[in-house]
Amino acid sequence: MDAKGKVVVVTGATSGLGQAAAIDLAKRGARVLVVGRDAARANETLEQMKKAGGDGEVILGDVSTVAGARKLARAILEKAPRLDVLINNAGGTFKTESKTAEGIETTFALNTLGAFVLEKELHGALAAAKGRVVNLATGFLDSFPVEVDELVAPKKYAGLAQYGRSKQASVMMTVEQAKRYAAEGVSAVSLHPGVIMGTRFGGGQPKVMQLLAGPLMRLIGLGCTLEEAQRRFFVAAFGDVPNGSYIVNGKPAELPKQVKDEAVRAKVYSLLEKLAVSPSA
Ligand SMILES: NC(=O)c1ccc[n+]([C@@H]2O[C@H](COP(=O)([O-])OP(=O)(O)OC[C@H]3O[C@@H](n4cnc5c(N)ncnc54)[C@H](OP(=O)(O)O)[C@@H]3O)[C@@H](O)[C@H]2O)c1
């Protein structure tokens, strides 16, 4: 496992886990392209990378729409025609339902579709380096079965459930990417980093969850420090793990039940392919 001289894109590198991973990977010698929406926060990450002895660049962009992800990919390709690792870390959960300008439920648009489009657009650069895509997931996925027809527009919205579904769909997407790209030498893994309170992520949860989740998760052994999370990102990006792995606690874990269902996976993947071409359809 060596990050030296590798080119790594980290989306959502302006905060929390993405920021911590960007700093750690830069410290390990990777050239990190810091992707974010906010210039000041992105530059702060770059500063911290430099302080840690690393280097990279800032690229601004929004991955929650297909048009935004495509535009961002063009800017990345100018800096990195050859890309070793794409970490699709940008993500979030939302208390109230909303849609993107392209008419897609925001959680799914940001956590899954944006990641899908970014990889598609950067695929040539990843293939040139026989690189890897890391898609951020979460845990407890068996509790959030996907209704494929409702990903874009859920019948009844609940923030946490839609978050879980979007992440389950991301794990399905990852397994399909791994299968489809193996011959080209491009690998794909999904990563549950652990439960880390204190990032901005928790801000989208009800207050009571924000207060209780950290201590509760630590108590049952699922809580994780930023340092542990950094190590897990490193393993996901550069570790010798099987293609298509779902990495939990820093090692490959059993796939969630529904992810093993080839028919559902294929349906999710073809939905993503369709939306990537025509998101407003
Ligand atoms: N924290 C946890 O316990 C936990 C557990 C499991 C999985 N995860 C996953 O880990 C990832 C990082 O979470 P975190 O806890 O570090 O959350 P965070 O502190 O809220 O960071 C989220 C990052 O995503 C970026 N982002 C949000 N919407 C975006 C958009 N439309 N376009 C581009 N970037 C956007 C944010 O950028 P701005 O600065 O522009 O807002 C920020 O940099 C997420 O995918 C999350 O689902 C977290």
Image (tube, helix red, strand yellow):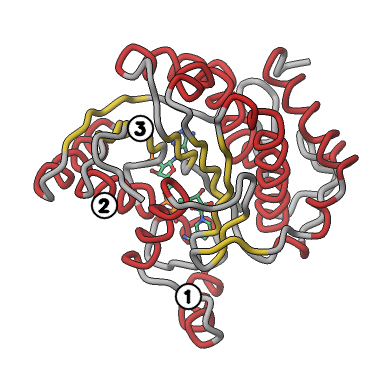
Identify the residue at image location x=13%, y=50%: 52
Tell me where residue 109 appears, x and y as whole percent.
63, 33
Identify the residue at image location x=47%, y=25%: 126
For this rendering, which residue is in front, 144 or 267?
A: 267
Amino acid type shown at disc 3: Val
Left or right of 276? Residue 222 is left
Left or right of 48? Residue 232 is right
Residue at the farthest bottom position: 219
Residue 17 occupies quadrant: bottom left
Q: Secondary structure at mark 1?
A: loop
Identify the residue at image location x=59%, y=24%: 184
- Would you say the residues marked 1 and 3 are in contact, meaning their CB atoms lie under 8 Å apart? no
Q: CA distance from mark 3 to mark 2?
A: 15 Å
* Mark 3, residue position: 35
For this rendering, which residue is in front, 154 or 236?
A: 236
- The circle drawn on residue 26 is none
* Mark 2, residue position: 24
| 230 over 30 or under it: above or below | below
